[in-house]
Image: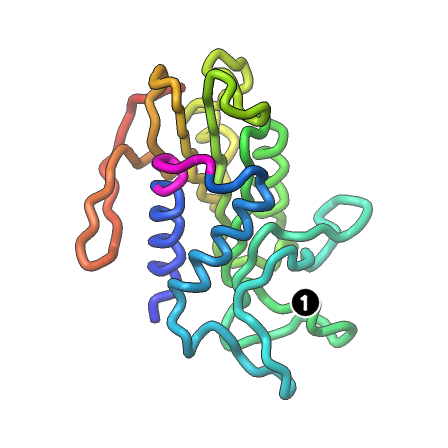
Amino acid sequence: MDLNALVEQSLYEFCAEFVDTPYLCYTEHGIHALFFQRLYDAIPEESRYFTWQDRKVCVIQKEYPTASDLGKPKRQNWDLSVIKMPPETISDKNPFDFFRLEFVIEFGLNEAREHLVEDVRRLSHPSSNVENRYCVHLYRFSDGVSGRDWSTRSKRILGLNDIREIVSGTDVTVFRTVADTTGSLKYGFWKITSDSVSGGGLDIEGCIPKFFLVSFFTI
């Protein structure tokens, strides 16, 4: 099983689903739970759990603790994590709380710049204990469908270049996802790294998504 390809494929499909049906979940926590279910179903049944010290453990964890305080007063929790296989703990004290993590995915639904900046900072921290780092930055716009929606005129909207600046010098990947029921903005999703921006469509061959590079859509 190519876990890297599987997780990225799940992220692409999840973002595409959000663009098409942005009201499946009311809150960000609901979005966490929905992606947990989507990723769980995507992982082959024989790989969903492992045995550690005679205990059965799910490879996907919600609110798994950070390995250190990451510059904060105390340890925090990741939105969604995938434990690295074979399992390895980095602490003899409370070892179940310190598994090495293959993936961490942080989510934000209509969050301001500060939220994404902090997610990127924590993910790229030298003590994050994470191999592959992702943020899913979701925007949902409407003319009053929900009080949680943003106006398309909001000054808090981050463009592609804004996010490129935030992730510059890090190995964090951001999926900027836009669902707009008003039809006034370019909707879709874009994969943004320190080196590139890709997005605008899906071309799936053999279940491996391929994006073309874009240099437009600046909202």
- From the viewer's perspective, is residue 31 above or below residue 19? below
Quarter containing the C terminus: top left
Q: Which residue is most to the front?
A: 145
Residue nearer the viewer, 26 or 153: 26
Q: Quadrant of residue 198?
A: top left
Residue 142 lies in the magenta-colored region = no
Q: Is residue 48 above or below residue 157?
A: below
> Which residue appears at 39% of the width and 23% of the height?
181
Above or below, 175 relative to 5: above
Left or right of residue 177: residue 86? right
Please, is residue 193 above or below residue 207 in the view?
above
Extent of the magenta region: 17-23
Query: Front-most of 163 and 186?
Result: 186
Could you say whether the residue bearing mark 1 is in a helix, strand or loop? loop
Camera-nearest residue between 22 and 11 = 22
Q: Say which residue label 1 marks.
A: 98
Residue 120: give x, y in percent of width and height: 57, 40
Q: Quadrant of the N terminus?
A: bottom left
Let me know if residue 49 appears in the view. yes
What is the tally of numbered marks visible in this picture?
1
Which residue is painted at 34% across and 41% down in the image? 16
* Relative image position of residue 164 (x, y in whole percent): 44, 30
Q: Position of residue 130 (x, y in %)?
A: 56, 57
Residue 79 in percent (x, y) is at: 60, 50
Q: Residue at x 54, y 67 (%)?
A: 83
Residue at position x 75%, y 53% from top? 75
Q: Is residue 20 magenta?
A: yes
Q: Would you say 146 lies left or right of 2 here?
A: right
